[in-house]
Image (tube, rainbow, N blue to C red):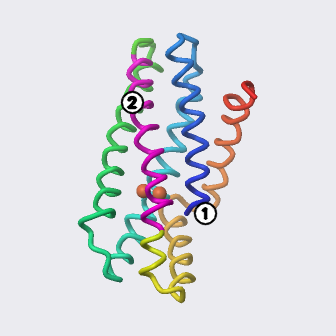
Amino acid sequence: MKREHEEITEMLSILERISERIRSEVEIDPEHLKRALEFIKVFADRCHHGKEEGILFPMMEGYGVPRAGPIGVMLMEHELGRGYVNEMAEAMERYRAGDVEALDIFAENAEKYIELLKQHIDKENDILFRIAETHIPRDEDEKLLERFEELENEKIGPGRHMELQNILKGLAAIYLKENQ
Ligand SMILES: [Fe+2]
Ligand SMILES: [Fe+2]
């Protein structure tokens, strides 16, 4: 799950560059917005948050971690993130239809999403996953990984993760290389 966080964090850096370009009024290829959103919707939300909401959090609850507390906060932040993603998707459609001003709305929501998700990921890595490790017995690890795999195949389909990783690589080559 931490490795998935690294992929998501890389996409957040790309989104940050995109947002900076929008703010300095550089034209953006709508196809890039579409690909970034596809990664976020399908991988970050449906697949990764799906694993947390459908498998990890319920298992933690099963081992006595109350929902009120860090788990509840994580769930709330997933919901908040979905709101920003929907706003970005709507703005992208308007931009694709020729409305240049919609780009500002895209950037605004992208910035909120980046800020939210960065601290969300930090909290999960530093706090939530540690709670999970102390409550879920080691011999459940294999089952947990199997169920993650099953959920991934069921929610996004086999091979889809690799396609999305290619989207990530492609956008990273465009947005993350030039400033190095
Ligand atoms: Fe999460
Ligand atoms: Fe996460």
Q: What element carries label 1?
A: loop
Residue that badge 1 annotates = 158
**Where does the image place residue 55, in percent across and percent down from the top left?**
42, 72
Which quarter of the figure has residue 31?
top right
Query: Which residue is found at the position 60% from the left and 34% from the top?
Result: 14
Amino acid on which disc 2 is placed: Asn
> How many dots with numbers?
2
Task: Estimate the x, y position of residue 68 in percent, counting from the top left.
Answer: 23, 66
In the figure, is residue 112 to the left or right of 176?
A: left
Our reading of the magenta stretch's main secondary structure is helix
Task: Name the residue nearer the viewer: 83 or 77.
Answer: 77
| Location of residue 163 with respect to 136 vertically, above or below | above
| Residue 126 located left or right of residue 10 | left
The amino acid on which the numbered mark 1 sits, given as a three-letter code, is Pro
The residue drawn where x is 42% and y is 25% is: 106
Residue 168 image position (x, y, % from top left): 64, 42
State which region is magenta. Answer: 102-129
Beta carbon of the mark 1 residue lies under 8 A of ligand 2: no
Within 8 Å of ligand 1, the CB of disc 2? Answer: no
The residue furthest bottom is 139
Q: Does the magenta stretch include residue 29?
A: no
Task: Indicate whether 117 appears above or below 65.
Answer: above
Q: Is residue 105 magenta?
A: yes
Task: Work out which quarter of the rendered image holds the C terminus and state it.
Answer: top right
Q: How far apart are marks 2 and 1 (CA)?
A: 31 Å
Q: Can residue 9 be seen in this view?
A: yes
Which mark, by number, is residue 109? 2
